[in-house]
Image: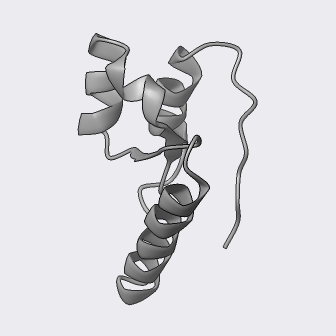
Amino acid sequence: PAVILSNHQSVLDMMGLMEVLPDNCVQVGKKELMYMGSVGLIMYLGGVIFINRKSTSSAKMVMSEVAKTMVAENV
């Protein structure tokens, strides 16, 4: 298991990571990226989990549910 953090130079970094990372990786991004037109659509369709960084409780809840799903699916 590993956690990979990406300090993005652009929003295109996340789309590039989709091709490089193994299939059993889960990507998390800030919710604002979902509204970046075609980039947001591609990220959404690519399975990126979006979190609301302005709401700590919401972000923690989403990440907790993702973690539970990952454990259940042995990801």
Here the colouring is one colour
Query: Image point 29% across, 36% down: which residue?
Result: 44
Left-right relation of 38 to 74: left
Instruction: Say whether residue 25 is visible.
Output: no
Query: Image point 50% across, 48% down: which residue?
Result: 27
Q: Which quarter of the figure has residue 70?
A: bottom left
Q: Quarter of the image for the N terminus: give it.
A: bottom right
Q: Quarter of the image for the C terminus: give it.
A: bottom left
Q: Position of residue 59 (x, y in %)?
A: 53, 56
Q: Position of residue 39 (x, y in %)?
A: 36, 17
Q: Position of residue 18 (x, y in %)?
A: 45, 37
Left-right relation of 46 to 20: left
Above or below, 64 against 56 in this view is below
Query: Image point 69% across, 23% down: which residue?
Result: 8
Instruction: Say whether residue 71 is visible.
Output: yes
Above or below, 44 against 32 in this view is below
Above or below, 71 against 49 in this view is below
Query: Image point 34% across, 20% down: which residue?
Result: 35
Foreground residue among 2 and 60:
60
Above or below, 30 against 9 in this view is below
Foreground residue among 60 and 57:
57
